[in-house]
Amino acid sequence: MWCCAKDVSSQQADISDQLKAANRAPDAEETVKGPVTPSAAKPGNTEKKESEGQEWTITLRKTPGSRLGVDVDLADGETLQVDTVNEGLVNDWNKANPSKEVRKDDRIISVNGVRGTATKLTDVCKSAEVLEMVVQRTPA
């Protein structure tokens, strides 16, 4: 399920509600196909300068009834900041790919090549069956 943090604009809250509805499992028992094998590394996407943090790509395949299983904060308007990883496709990815684990405070900066606004990212997450997400972790 997707959600956003406290004190965000009504537009961000509307996006959160749309994502929750899109991510809600049907009445039937949930069927999760799980993560796709890791994408091949793309030049410039795997490592950045230490001051910029690390970036890597994860690929998830949605199936009927599957959930992404992350709560995100849309407050910066440009990325999806991971607040919580719950049961779902992202958690399945983490189990299968511990070296590329998605954690709290990581940012999803691109989905299927789309960047720019949190609204665009959430639209792609709702509509696409396969999600290729670029995740960024900045140094603490």
Image (cartoon, rainbow, N blue to C red):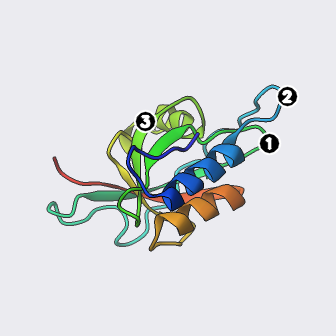
Residue name at image x 41 percent, y 53 percent = 8
Q: Is residue 47 above or below residue 137?
A: below
Q: Amino acid at mark 3?
A: Thr
Residue name at image x 43 percent, y 68 percent = 42
Which residue is at the front of the view, 55 or 29?
29
First reached walking from the N terminus: tag 1 or tag 3 = 1
Where is residue 100? Give x, y as percent: 40, 45
Q: Secondary structure at mark 3?
A: strand
Reading the image, the residue beneath label 3 is: 84
Reading the image, the residue beneath label 2 is: 28
The disc label shown at residue 64, or none: 1
Q: Amino acid at mark 1?
A: Pro
Q: Are marks 1 and 2 in contact (CB under 8 Å)?
A: yes
First reached walking from the N terminus: tag 3 or tag 2 = 2
Q: CA distance from mark 1 to mark 3?
A: 22 Å
Residue name at image x 35 percent, y 61 percent = 76
Q: Is residue 50 above or below residue 71?
A: below
